[in-house]
């Protein structure tokens, strides 16, 4: 049974979601639009495609009226086998209005599986950019390559990783794992260099975004980035939200960065954020109460079942905080209370989504099970004494010291009892991640183990690159995790105040400190390319040398392979 707050939110979001309208296109070319029959518009925010299936693809654009807007405006669209549009296979018209921020979404159906196609929109002789798309394959493919992205912060820098991937013809689809936008205002997170590099917020969108108009304007700003426009035009996207599409550290009934006393009702804010998301992203909008449900799956031929999860909105309990178990006056930590909370049945997915996930894993005959989701799933434990450090500038040296002690012990050196206790008494460094929901993670891992499935988790959120083993509480490996760096959001180097040399040194040492960690990069922005074949999953991290200028180059790569 829904609680009263959830029922109230569903009423809010259902009325908001009604504004997100999709034209469903089934027929052939009989409805080919004449360019002079459509309204005069500008396609200033580019084109996009997404949510591919074996016979359908979502198309997106924004049609900004050139003149005083009619209540409803009409644009045409065309899908062809070739970039010159000499072989048009689908066409039609779609309508939009201010009610949905002049965004246009068309669900083109009855397309051949594994088909490369070209699409464009037209309004009174004005054509949009040409987009490239592809439907999902059915069977018999050797490999699929996914570009994996997360965390793009507009004032922090140019979206060069998007641009770099747009030039790679070998990438088939893009996975975006969330934090596509950020909610902060001018002077907030990531804003330090904004004025110097020309990435400030406009006057009508320079506060923290709360209302529907706020969220719409923020998406519109992000979509002016040339790299993002290029990638959307080049590849179909499969997307899921993280927290910043709403506000920082969102959970089902609230968020760390939402203060009801000054920012109003959380459910109203979340409804506005979700409506803007479905308006601006190339994703099939849900129906009615299912507006909360973004989790879904995609069959990548017989190679993989791609399962996209929601670890933020649909079922997450509020995050634990070390501060909640620390006496403010004495600084004493309530270890017993903390352990009891950690061992409770708190949820990051919610019961319904968890059961759906288990069913997906059980029913799939695909060679690989790929979980596309927001947060690190691996065990990421630091020495507990380091977690309690109030001075961030000391954390790197403490971690380096812990690595030296663990390496010395591994080499046979005798440690003191105090040193042993220091490195063996560990606790999760990030309670917002799966580490804060350890019991539910263990339930999932035990299910995976019993089924004998091969799982690969793709994660974002942290702004740094990670390669982790996924293990049960007894140390049995059930899968592997590849975490992507951010597009532009600052990483661990900023949080800990590290120069590049220290960040590299710490990255080399951390796998000694964290048992399941195999590799990390703590200071460079970039993305991943994940190649799926029957024999192996090959993952490549790619890093750019700068996001502070559009003049960039690839600065390095790292590769890892998983054979299951």
Image (cartoon, rainbow, N blue to C red):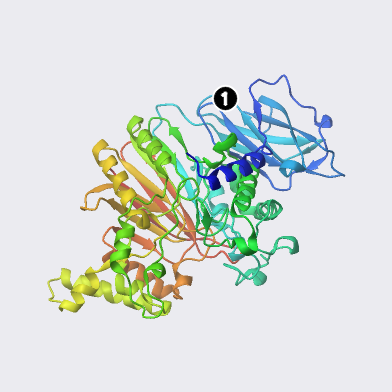
Question: Where does residue 479 sit, x and y in percent of width and height?
Answer: 30, 46
Query: Looking at the rendering, which quadrant does residue 408 occupy?
Result: bottom left
Question: Splitting the image into 4 quarters, where does residue 523 fall?
Answer: bottom left
| Residue matched to label 1 | 111
Q: Residue furthest right?
A: 68
Which residue: 48% across, 47% down? 147
Quadrant in which the C terminus appears? top left
In the rendered view, would you say 505 is above or below 350?
Answer: below
Residue 410 can be seen in this image: yes
Characterize the local packing of mark 1: few (<14), some (14-19) or many (20 or more) Cα atoms within 10 angstroms.
some
Q: How many marks can you see?
A: 1
Residue 129: tell me if it is visible.
Answer: no
Snapshot quadrant of residue 394: bottom left
Residue at disc 1, secondary structure: loop
Towards the viewer: 353 or 464: 353
Where in the figure is residue 177, as x and y percent of width and height? Answer: 49, 49
Residue at 64% over, 69% down? 194
Residue 425 in picture, x, y percent from top left: 24, 69
> What percent of the width, then of the height, locates residue 545?
51, 64
Residues 397 and 322: in front is 322
């Amino acid at each position: 049974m829904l609680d009263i707050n959830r029922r109230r939110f569903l009423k809010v979001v259902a009325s908001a979601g009604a504004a997100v309208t999709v034209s469903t296109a089934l027929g052939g070319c009989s409805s080919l639009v004449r360019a002079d029959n459509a309204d005069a518009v500008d396609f200033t925010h580019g084109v996009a495609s997404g949510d591919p299936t074996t016979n359908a693809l979502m198309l997106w654009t924004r049609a900004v009226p050139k003149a005083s807007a009619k209540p409803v405006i009409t644009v045409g669209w065309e899908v062809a086998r070739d970039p010159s549009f000499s072989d048009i296979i689908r066409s039609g018209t779609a309508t939009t209005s201010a009610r949905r921020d002049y965004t246009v979404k068309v669900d083109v159906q009855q397309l051949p599986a594994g088909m490369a196609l070209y699409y464009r929109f037209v309004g009174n002789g004005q054509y949009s950019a040409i987009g490239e798309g592809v439907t999902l394959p059915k069977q018999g493919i050797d490999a699929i390559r996914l570009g994996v992205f997360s965390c793009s912060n507009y004032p922090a820098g140019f979206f060069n990783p998007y641009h770099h991937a747009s030039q790679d013809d070998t990438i088939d689809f893009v996975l975006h794992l969330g934090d596509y936008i950020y909610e902060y205002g001018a002077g907030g997170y990531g804003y330090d260099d904004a004025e110097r590099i020309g990435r400030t917020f406009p006057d009508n969108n320079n506060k923290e975004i709360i209302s529907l108009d706020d969220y719409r304007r923020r998406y519109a700003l992000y979509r002016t980035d040339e790299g993002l426009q290029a990638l959307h035009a080049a590849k179909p996207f499969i997307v899921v939200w993280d927290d910043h599409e709403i506000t920082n550290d969102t959970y089902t009934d609230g968020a760390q960065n939402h203060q009801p006393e000054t920012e109003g009702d959380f459910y109203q804010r979340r409804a506005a954020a979700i409506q803007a998301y479905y308006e601006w992203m190339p994703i099939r909008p849900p129906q009615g109460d299912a507006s909360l449900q973004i989790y879904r799956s995609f069959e990548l031929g017989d190679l993989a079942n791609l399962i996209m999860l929601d670890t933020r909105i649909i079922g997450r309990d509020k995050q634990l905080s070390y501060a909640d178990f620390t006496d403010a006056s004495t600084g004493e930590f309530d270890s017993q209370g903390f352990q009891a909370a950690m061992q409770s049945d708190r949820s990051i997915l919610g019961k319904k989504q968890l059961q759906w996930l288990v069913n997906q894993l059980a029913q799939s005959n695909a060679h690989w099970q790929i979980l596309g989701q927001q947060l690190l799933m691996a065990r990421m434990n630091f020495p507990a004494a380091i977690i309690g450090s109030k001075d961030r500038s000391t954390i790197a040296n403490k971690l380096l010291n812990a690595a030296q002690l663990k390496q010395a012990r591994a080499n046979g050196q005798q440690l003191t009892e105090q040193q042993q206790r220091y490195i063996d008494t560990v606790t999760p460094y990030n309670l917002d991640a799966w580490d804060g929901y350890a019991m539910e993670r263990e339930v999932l891992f035990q299910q995976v183990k019993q089924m004998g499935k091969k799982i690969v988790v793709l994660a974002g959120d942290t702004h740094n690159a990670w390669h982790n083993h996924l293990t049960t509480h007894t140390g049995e490996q059930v899968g592997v995790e590849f975490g992507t760096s951010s597009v532009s959001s600052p990483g661990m180097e900023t949080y800990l105040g590290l120069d590049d040399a220290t960040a590299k040194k710490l990255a080399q040492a951390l796998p000694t400190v964290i048992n399941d960690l195999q590799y990390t990069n703590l200071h460079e922005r970039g993305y991943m390319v994940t190649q799926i074949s029957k024999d192996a999953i090959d993952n490549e991290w790619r890093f750019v040398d700068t996001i502070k200028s559009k003049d960039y180059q690839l600065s390095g790569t790292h590769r890892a392979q998983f054979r299951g």
